[in-house]
């Protein structure tokens, strides 16, 4: 059982669903799925939403606010966020619930109710279990956004396990159409995204470390897509960073399936960067992100060196 009596009671309050920085499909889809069963809930983000996340919100006709209130008279649910910094300032509220699948969860205030299943490959899978445990009906929209979240967070099922496929099967039974999901997420990229990807390739620097290739690059946006591009181009590890005039910076990383199968883990590496440099980090062995304050080039180099050290320990 995932839900204790405190959680069940908190879910009866007015709900604020918080998604993380640069929210991906797992975060956005999980929020929209919960709103289908709790229609009075509100969704908010502390900053922008990824392009695929925007597609999901558009399909659901959901207008997501980007400035959380300072106080909330009810329950705040933080989705896909291993720590408070991952989703921005948390409003003062009666209750806080965290629903997440990342390996390490920390930093939440005392009294926070945490639903944590690191064996799941996406937060969407946990949301499916929560809805089923509550005995609530999953409509087609709910099934579609959850399947979209699973599809993207597992790298198009490349990082899936048996639990993932069991969840996907239940969602197709509930009305989700796999081909519809693929088409929805494979829409024509905007010109700004295409030019960013080309710049990421143009600015790429790479080094061979033994039998592995580590690539880095710098862009102004679309970091995660740019990192995926570098993997497609041949890198085993890709680190793509961006920064703002305020000193805020972000790193998105990806690793090839081959290197992940050897035990390489990007999430633990970026968590180590966050411990040394401040900021927040989270993710999976093959895909992880870091948000912090500082020089993007210096912190990316720190992350790259940690990747190289980890490579030396692989079989």
Image: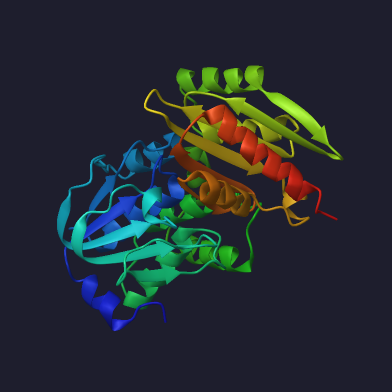
The residue closer to the viewer here, 57 or 276, is 276
Q: Residue furthest left?
A: 73
Q: Quadrant of the C terminus?
A: bottom right
Identify whether 243 is placed above or below 6: above
The residue closer to the viewer here, 180 or 2, is 2
Q: How is the image coloured?
A: rainbow
Q: Quadrant of the N terminus?
A: bottom left
**Rendering coords of residue 104 (x, y %):** 52, 62
Q: Residue at x 22, y 77 (%)?
A: 9
Identify whether 133 is placed above or below 148: below
Q: Residue at x 69, y 35 (%)?
A: 231
Identify whether 171 is placed above or below 183: below
The residue closer to the viewer here, 32 or 1, is 1
Image quarter of residue 174: bottom left
Q: Residue furthest front?
A: 276
**Rendering coords of residue 267 (x, y %):** 59, 52
**Rendering coords of residue 239 (x, y %):** 62, 35
Residue 39 in view of the camera: no
Image quarter of residue 115: bottom left
Identify whether 60 is placed above or below 241: below
Q: Residue at x 58, y 31 (%)?
A: 298
**Rendering coords of residue 32 (x, y %):** 32, 52
Left or right of 198 on screen, residue 282: left
């Amino acid at each position: 059982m995932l839900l204790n009596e405190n959680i069940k009671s908190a879910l009866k309050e007015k709900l604020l669903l918080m998604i993380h920085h640069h929210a991906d499909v797992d975060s956005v889809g999980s929020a929209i799925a919960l709103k289908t069963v709790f229609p009075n809930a509100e969704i908010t983000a502390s900053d922008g939403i990824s392009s695929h996340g925007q597609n999901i919100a558009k399909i659901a006709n959901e207008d997501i606010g980007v400035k959380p209130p300072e106080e909330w008279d009810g329950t705040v649910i933080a989705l896909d966020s291993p720590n408070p910094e991952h989703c921005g300032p948390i409003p003062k509220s009666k209750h806080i619930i965290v629903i997440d699948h990342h390996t390490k969860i920390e930093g939440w205030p005392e009294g926070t109710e945490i639903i944590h299943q690191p064996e799941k490959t996406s937060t969407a899978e946990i949301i499916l279990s929560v809805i089923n445990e509550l005995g609530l009906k999953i409509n087609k929209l709910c099934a579609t956004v959850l399947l979209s979240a699973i599809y993207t967070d597992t790298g198009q099922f490349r990082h899936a396990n048996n639990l993932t496929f069991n969840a996907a099967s239940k969602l197709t039974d509930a009305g989700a159409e796999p081909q519809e999901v693929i088409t929805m997420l494979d829409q024509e990229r905007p010109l700004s995204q295409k030019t960013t990807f080309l710049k990421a390739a143009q600015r790429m620097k790479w080094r061979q470390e033994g039998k592995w290739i580590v690539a880095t690059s710098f862009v102004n946006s679309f970091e995660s897509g740019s990192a995926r591009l570098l993997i497609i181009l041949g890198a085993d590890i890709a680190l793509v960073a961006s920064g703002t005039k305020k000193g805020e910076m972000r790193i998105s990383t990806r690793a090839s399936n081959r290197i992940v199968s050897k035990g390489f883990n990007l999430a633990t590496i970026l968590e180590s960067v966050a411990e040394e440099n401040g900021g927040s980090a989270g993710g999976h062995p093959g895909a992880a992100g870091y948000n912090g304050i500082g020089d993007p080039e210096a912190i990316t180099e720190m992350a790259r060196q940690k990747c190289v050290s980890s490579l030396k320990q692989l079989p």
